[in-house]
Image: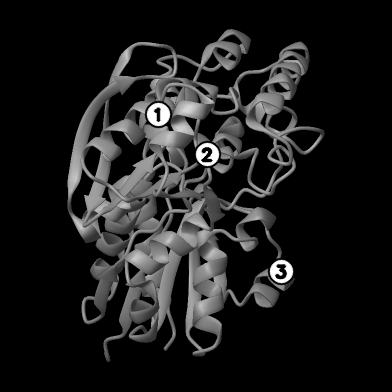
């Protein structure tokens, strides 16, 4: 059997597997079925959970800082320094997984981004001249107030960041306020009931006035519960999180060298085709005629949508496992098994 050059480049699988763990699970199953293939592992991220881990595997320079978590306790957060660039992941300081319990209306109101501001301060103290903040997976809807207060307030934060290139790495395009804003769209995912969503919207509206005119309506201002708005107000700009990872993990070179690409994520749906990791890979592969396979926790797209997106096929871990529960409880083994089955059935 002739071996293929296979690029394995998944995003994280929700809270069950990091992108690094997912890549390792896929590689294990694939190699069991197709030992002659050459595998390149290139885990990806769109700025959410796993952003720092993915960059750390390629760039090194992983640092740790003890900062405030979303509910005020202390957490150990990692960030990456590479030359004069610092890479920060907001989920390391204010992520849903740091709540210690299921999100509810109380956590939705209380959780703040102070720890993210402390990570920014740590990066400044380490001499960073460029700070990239990955947005996603947050438990917060404070509009980045905690971050700005940790830096001394709006005026002081702007002064401290003078001359610093600040980037909000996110593929979320939602504004801060309104029916497509941070509270309305993402609040319920963070435990907010309808009354709490209304409260959060009112609080964000008042905070927007302090951030300055024009900030709330910018694309990406609603990312990470409005943390995007705070970064924009401090002179930052939004860039695609997937593109940031692609650039700094040399993804284009990996794609060019591949005969086949295997990617994946927790839920492969319509949103996956709009600025997410899978769409970025499919776009790069299409121009080179490279097949793309998706292994995902759940797949909700029909074959026509896959074809239009340049995806050769998509396979569900849930279908392989036989239940959502087993797919989540035994995620690594089930993904390994699915990868093994897909590889064994591959026709060259």
Give the label, 2 or 3, closer to the camera. 2
Query: Which quadrant holds residue 272?
Result: bottom right
Query: Which quadrant holds residue 307?
Result: bottom right
| Image disc number at residue 117 | 1
Task: Find the distance from the CA under tag 1 to the CA under tag 3.
Answer: 41 Å
Q: How many marks?
A: 3
Classed neighbour count for the residue bearing mark 2: other residues with Cα under 10 Å, few (<14), some (14–19), many (≥20): many
Q: Please provide percent x and percent y for residue 92.
A: 36, 32
Q: Is residue 255 shown above or below 269?
A: below
Q: Upstream in the sequence, badge 1 or badge 2?
A: 1
Task: Find the distance from the CA under tag 2 to the CA under tag 3.
Answer: 39 Å
Q: Residue furthest top?
A: 106
**In this figure, which residue is indicated by the disc labeled 3?**
305
Q: Secondary structure at mark 2?
A: loop
Q: Please provide percent x and percent y for residue 9.
A: 38, 65
**In this figure, which residue is indicated by the disc labeled 2?**
234
Classed neighbour count for the residue bearing mark 3: other residues with Cα under 10 Å, few (<14), some (14–19), many (≥20): some
> Mark 2 touching mark 3, by CB under 8 A?
no
Q: Is residue 274 shown above or below 36?
A: above
Side (left or right) of 333 relative to 215: left
Task: Find the distance from the CA under tag 1 to the CA under tag 2.
Answer: 12 Å
Side (left or right) of 50 relative to 41: right
The answer to whether one can see residue 314 in this image is no
Classed neighbour count for the residue bearing mark 1: other residues with Cα under 10 Å, few (<14), some (14–19), many (≥20): many
Image point 54% across, 88% down: which residue?
287
Image point 60% across, 31% down: which residue?
225
Q: Upstream in the sequence, badge 2 or badge 3?
A: 2
């Amino acid at each position: 059997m002739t071996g293929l050059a296979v690029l394995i480049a998944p995003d994280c699988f929700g809270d069950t597997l990091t992108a690094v763990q997912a890549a390792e699970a896929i590689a294990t199953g694939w190699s069991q079925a197709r030992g002659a293939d050459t595998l390149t592992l290139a885990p990806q991220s769109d700025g959410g959970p796993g952003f720092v881990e993915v960059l750390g595997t390629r760039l090194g320079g992983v640092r740790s800082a003890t900062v405030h978590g979303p509910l005020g306790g202390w957490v150990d957060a990692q960030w990456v320094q590479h030359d004069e660039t610092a890479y920060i992941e907001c989920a390391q300081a204010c992520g849903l997984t740091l709540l210690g319990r299921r999100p509810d209306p109380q956590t939705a109101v209380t959780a703040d981004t102070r720890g993210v501001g402390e990570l920014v301060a740590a990066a400044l103290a380490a001499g960073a001249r460029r700070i990239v903040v990955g947005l996603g997976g947050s438990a917060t809807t404070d509009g980045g107030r905690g971050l700005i207060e940790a830096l001394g307030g709006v005026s002081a934060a702007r002064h401290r960041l003078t001359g610093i290139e600040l980037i909000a790495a996110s593929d979320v395009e939602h504004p801060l306020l309104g029916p497509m804003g941070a509270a309305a769209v993402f609040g319920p995912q963070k435990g907010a009931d309808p009354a709490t969503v209304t409260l959060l919207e009112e609080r964000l509206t008042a905070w927007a006035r302090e951030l300055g005119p024009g900030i709330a309506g910018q694309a990406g201002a609603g990312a990470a519960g409005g943390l995007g708005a705070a970064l924009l107000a401090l002179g930052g700009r939004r860039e695609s999180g997937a593109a940031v990872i692609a650039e700094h993990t040399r993804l284009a070179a990996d794609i060019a060298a591949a005969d086949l690409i295997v990617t994946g994520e927790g839920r492969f749906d319509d949103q996956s085709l709009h600025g997410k990791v899978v769409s970025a890979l499919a776009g790069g592969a299409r121009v080179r005629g490279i097949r793309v396979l998706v292994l995902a926790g759940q797949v909700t797209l029909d074959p026509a949508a896959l074809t239009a997106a340049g995806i050769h096929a998509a396979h569900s871990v849930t279908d392989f496992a036989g239940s959502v529960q087993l797919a989540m409880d035994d995620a690594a083994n089930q993904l390994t098994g699915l990868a093994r089955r897909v590889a064994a059935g591959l026709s060259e």
